[in-house]
Each structure stands twice: as C-alpha cells, then as structure tokens.
Image: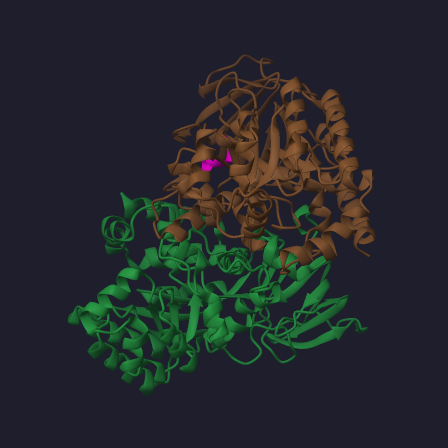
Chain colours: A brown, B green
Amino acid sequence: MPKILIRPGFILSGGDNWEVIRDNEILVEDGIIVYIGRRRDYVVGEIDRIIDGKNQLVMPGLINTHTHAAMALFRSFADDMPLMEWLEKKIWPAEERLKKEDIYWGTMLAISEMIRGGTTCFADMYFHMDDVARACLESGIRASLAQGLIGIDSEKGTAGLKQSKSLISSWHRAGEGRLTIMLGPHAPYTCPPRYLQDVMSIAADLKVPLHIHLAETRDEVRECLEKWGKRPVELMDSIGLFAHRVLAAHCVHLSEREIKILAEKQVFIAHNPGSNLKLGSGIAPLMNLLAAGAHVSLGTDGAASNNNLDMLEELRLAALLAKGFHEDPTVIPARKALQLATTNGAQALFLEAGLGTLTEEAPADLIMLDLLKPHLNPHHDLCAHLVYAASAADVELVMVKGKLLMEKRELLTIDEEMVLYEANRRAERLTR
Amino acid sequence: MPKILIRPGFILSGGDNWEVIRDNEILVEDGIIVYIGRRRDYVVGEIDRIIDGKNQLVMPGLINTHTHAAMALFRSFADDMPLMEWLEKKIWPAEERLKKEDIYWGTMLAISEMIRGGTTCFADMYFHMDDVARACLESGIRASLAQGLIGIDSEKGTAGLKQSKSLISSWHRAGEGRLTIMLGPHAPYTCPPRYLQDVMSIAADLKVPLHIHLAETRDEVRECLEKWGKRPVELMDSIGLFAHRVLAAHCVHLSEREIKILAEKQVFIAHNPGSNLKLGSGIAPLMNLLAAGAHVSLGTDGAASNNNLDMLEELRLAALLAKGFHEDPTVIPARKALQLATTNGAQALFLEAGLGTLTEEAPADLIMLDLLKPHLNPHHDLCAHLVYAASAADVELVMVKGKLLMEKRELLTIDEEMVLYEANRRAERLTR
C-alpha cells in the first residue's frame, strides 16, 4: 500500500482529551498510522501521496454500534405509526420478501450513506449476512456482523445457529481483520432462556461476542415480568448471559438494580437516542448509566426507524437529550459525546487496540471535515462544532485501514449511481 | 424582474396537506408565483430562465421564528456550562464589546448559514438593528427584526424605545416589504410591568407586534412568582400584553392554566427545542400546547446556544422529542412538523397571505433540495425524508421574493469568503 501523508489544519487525535493540534501531520503506511506529530521534511519519492487541508480537521472515524443496514430499503416506508402496527402491517411483510440480492444492495445503500457521514465501522444485525459481508468487503468499511437469531420458532432457531457458525468460519477476521462476527440473539422476547443457553455455548466455543436488543420498550419489560417474573436485564443476568462479552442495544427501560447489573457485569450498551425517540420507546437514562460506571457507545439503529445513519446527528442528540432531560447543560460535554462515538464504540465492538483514536501503530481509520463553512465558524472550539454544529455533509474524506473510501465527497469504492438505482428498484418491489 | 420557470421532479406546495406532486412546474414573475401546475408550452423568449431539476424537490422556504443572528460570532465560545455562568462570565462580557460593524458581519455569517439551510425568513431580536436590517436588505433574505429592550435600567429602557421607534420608521416594510419590525421587550424578568405598558402603548400607536422571551427556565418562573406573585404567562396576561399581537419565544415551563391562556389569547409561540435542550432549560410541552389549540412555530435561537441555525434539524428535533417524551410515535407526524416550520412560521411573523406555502399569487419564497443522495433514497415518502432524514446541505437553491439567493449551493448575494474572514477576525477580538 502507498505511503499517504495527511497535513490538515487541525488534528483531533481523540481518546481522553480531544485536544486540537494545529499544523501537524499524519503518515499512513500499510493501513497503519506510523507517525503523528510535527511536520517533517521528506526526500523526493519517499511519500506516494500528500493530502493537504489547510481548513480541514482530521479526527478518528465514527463507530456506529447498532444498526440494521439493509433496512435502508425501508427508509420512509412507514413513519409516525404505533410500534406493533409498524412492525406487523409494514416492516415484517416487506422483510418477508427480502432476497439475498436485496440485502446486498440495501446494505450498499446504507454503507454509502455511512461513509458519506464519516462512519468507518458499524455493527449490524440482520439476515443473509453473507451478502452483508460481501458489501462490507467490497466497500472497504469495517464492520462487526451478526445474524439475527429468533429462538421462539425452533426450526428457525436451529437454522440460525447453523448459519451463524458458518458466518463465523467464512468471515470472522476477513478483509485483513476488517470484518468480525458476533452472535445475534435478537432479544429476550424472541429468544427464550433455553435457546440463549445454546447461543452462549457457541459463543464460548468460538470465542465471539453477543449482540442483543435489550429493554427497548415498556411492553418488553411488562411481558418479560409476566412471563419470567424478572425484568429483561435481570433475566439475562440470571441465565449467565453477561458472563460473555455482550453488546446490548437500547437499554431504555431500566430499574436502578438493572443499571447496577449492566455496570458491574461490564455490558457494552449501544445507546440509540434517535430511534428511541422516533419509535416512541422513550428516553434512556444515559446519565444514570454513566454515573454507575456503565460502558455506553452510540448507534443509529436501522433507517426504517431513525431515518438516517448519521452518527454526528446521533452524538449531538445524545448530548442534547441528556442535558434537556436532566435540565443540566453540563452533562455530556462535547468531548464526552465524541468519546461515545469513537473510543467507546471501538471497545463495544471489541476492536483492536488503538481504534477509535489517532495514535501511532493504530489502524488508520480517520475522517477529514471541511471547516470553511458558515455553520463551522468562528473557531472558538472545534470539538463543540463537531458535536453541536457539524453535519454529515461536512465530511470530505474517509479512510479505513489506510484505504481512501471517500475523497472530496466522492465515493471511491462504490458505484453510487448503481446503488441508488438498484435500491430504488428493489424498494419499490418489496413494498408494492 | 425576469420570468423564471422551475421544473423540479417533485413539488410540495405545503399548507395543510403536503401532497407530493410530480413533474409540474412553477412560474415566477415579479417576485410572485404566477402559475403552479401541469407543464405547459411556451414560445421562444417568453421565459427568461428555466431551472430544471429531475431529482430535485421544491417546497416553501423555512421560517425561523426566533434567533439572535449576530450571536453566530459566539458559536462554540461557551458550551456545556450552567446558564448563569455562561451568561455572566462569557456571553455578556463579550457582548459588551460588540460594535455596529461586528453586528453586521455576525448577522451576515448567520444569514449565510440560514440561506444554505433553506431558511428564507427569520425573526431576530438583538441590538444595533440598523446593521441587521442592512445585512438583510443586502443579502435578500426576509426578516422580522426587533431591538431587544431591557427595562430594568431606566436610561437604557428609554433609549431602547426611542431606537425601536426609529427602527420602525426607517425599516418597517423596507425592501419592498421584505423587512418588518417588531418591538422586542426582552423578557418579563428584564422588563417590569410598568415598562411593558410603555412598550404596549407604542405597539398600539404604530401597529407593530411584540417579540418576547417567555417562561424559558424554571428560575424565571420562580423569580416571577417571588416578585409578582404570578407565573410569567399569568403576569403578562394580567397586564394586558396578550391584547397585542405577541410572538413568545420558548414557553417551556407552563402551568395548565398558562397553556390555556396562551391558546385562548392566540399568542404565537416560537418553540426552540435545540436551545432548550442544550442550555438545560427543559422540554417544552409541545403536545399539550397543540392540544389546547395554541399556535406553535419553530426557532433555532442564537448560535451561541444551539449551535447552528438549521431549521431542518430543528423541525426533526421537535417531532422526535415530542414522540419520545410522550412515548407515542404518532404525535407530530412529518406533515405537522413541516407546517410548524412553514405556514405556522409565516403566521407567527404576521407575514403576507400565502407565505409559507407555494400557491399562485403568493410571494416566491421557495427552496429546492437534491434527492440524489443515499440518505434520501428510496422514495417511499418524501415528506418523511424532509423531517427524518434530510439535512441543510441537501438544499441546492433558495429563492426569496422571486430572487435567487443560492444556486447549486453557491451564495449569489453574499461574498462568503469575506464574511468568514470578517467573522473570524472579529470573533477573536471580541473573545480575547
């Protein structure tokens, strides 16, 4: 791979401090950041490509820890409806018609959008995951994939476990480590404890984490109490799920005791404020979770329930919502919101060390934003701009593992015109 | 003025139904929409300019009913701080240094951003309003301006009234009606009842509306109760303020009785969800207000407390927040959110008939968005896209009163490079 030198006006290396460093440079070689620091002199031919950006800011790529990418095909298909009506009358019948190729193109649509918004890695739970893996490998994005497992139907449940094992053997660590696989038991209400025992046994055998929906709605909590005499997080704890590495999406309706369990058992929580608001699920107790020491990252959820996959919007919403809900402007300050979307995301997806930050020896997953825009001026505090003012369209360049996926807002690994054409054609058929 | 014919793929004329009409056209002449309907044939020379947009959507311009434009100079200067510390240690000392020319350039920065995000009209409350008026006239945007009046200092109070009268005589209905002037008593806690009587008497004499901050924080309500024995809305009602046309910003902390008063007295409420969240003011009871029959429009507030002036973001936030807060996905459906940002805004600013919609004989205030983007596909429901997926950067073209202010994302009436340069230079001086 070529040696690429990036010289932006501003570098935010992320991690714990999000300090803004001016006029430094980043050297990338073989997918790795090999140097970050003061600008140096190089001899002719030593560098293959120099990317200059006087009015640009480079920061770690954003990490979306919960989505269903191919659901981008159902964006704006069903909105403003009660949850069960939305699922039963619109989403499930349309999903029944989804074929392998639809999943591929729907995922490509989602990946196109995610790259355009500065997302360099995402966690997906859906089905026909071989086709999702194919889209990820081709597009160059980093991802952690899970086949959604439904255990209430024993035939489907068994088939899902088989598919998951095949997914792991085919794709785990593919693309030189860009892809990883998780097991995806859908939720406590679709995966009874006996089935979850089977899932956990595979997780232990094959050493892969679990990705599950948890405590998303009041109805889920009520039904869980009725059926099992425990709230969802309590139930999962009682069957030993949290002895495994678990990424739990949503966690909106939690008791004090459950918040304590999530923190103590080091469960990784994907907070999805946009989806939780839009579906009327409620407002997750983000501050209580963080105060208890729980580990929180951010997800967009699928585009049928958000309706975009914009991580800058999601991190803004997380910060604003916590401030407004608690009537305290000091909670989730800008740098904390940025951590949720980067380092915390990398940990939640059990990615290799250094990811989510710009540091020497870390994989070069980075994004560059253009600051020469009215809404990003003046420059009192660039971190505050990223959280409270920036938008997906400010992202100019995206690099994953040293490879450029977007430059000057042009996608380099995806035929976008073809993706839009195929996505529209298929969406029409699926929802007719 | 030239005859401009616009032929987009989709027209949303707004109003009550927000129907999506395909392959129609809009003819604009002398600042007015003279025809909207099926495409017709024209003879050579009959039309001066044809704007085609196969993958574009045309809709009414967005109306921002509460901001402090020049505060764009303080964007990202002070965030994540308690309200009084934010005001006393950061904002007020910096505002003390503001000179006329700073206000002009700060307003130009804000107008640049607003045009880029599809805002065609805004309501401003600040000071040195002659310079704000100048920026509005030069840039071509529509605005309703109010000098912020502080009545607790009797000298400043008297001077403010004099400036307001001068503002009205100089600028009311200037720019062929593009500018209108309101009186801007800042808030009940800065304008005691006796002073408000003077303001009301001018409002009655000169037939101009009032723009006031009302019931923004819990502290305001507590202080008002301590000092006057009434809550803010009750106090304003008791002194007869609502016998005048009033635009009241925020209205976050309201009793049931106050909600009833606001509805019955037909007060126009500017809901600012982004600012209310970010400053930790709280979550306004939007649904209760609407259920009571109150009139609600949307505002961004100033960029020191938002931190952008993005009306698409604001209308999305209004819809999402109401759904999440009430745990009901059916409240504020997409078309309702679009009304808040268009027709309701036009009424709140007492603009001429037809504004906020695209209808024949209405002034041509319209925007065109590019739909050829992953996050705006597929096209199941374009109204849902506008509310739940679109972003400011999707706006390609902005027209106010028949004049093009932006085309292909290039500002046509503003020297943007100069604005960014001046804004940064001045912001640095003001906050040093």
Determine whether, in the image, residue B386 is placed left or right of residue A424: left
Image coordinates of residue A92 in percent, x first then y, are: 74, 50
Q: Position of residue B362 (x, y in %)?
A: 60, 78
Q: The N terminus of chain A lies in which quarter of the figure?
A: top right
Front one among B192 and B372: B192
Task: Residue A305 in the image: state x and y as whole percent.
Answer: 63, 50
Q: From the viewer's perspective, is residue B124 above or below residue A306?
A: below
Q: Main secondary structure of the magenta part?
A: helix
Give the residue displayed 47% in from the left and 49% down from the top: A375
Q: Is residue B167 visible?
A: yes
Residue A270 seen in render: no
Residue beneath the point at 60% across and 64% down: B333
Quick one: which residue is furthest to the bottom in this view? B205
Task: Tell me where the magenta segment starts and ends, as one range.
Answer: A338-342
Which corner quadrant of the image does residue B110 belong to? bottom left
Q: Which image quadrant is residue B193 in? A: bottom left
- Residue pictured at 44% horizontal, 33% vertical: A263
Q: How far across and down, in percent of the image, does residue B30 sit?
A: 61, 76
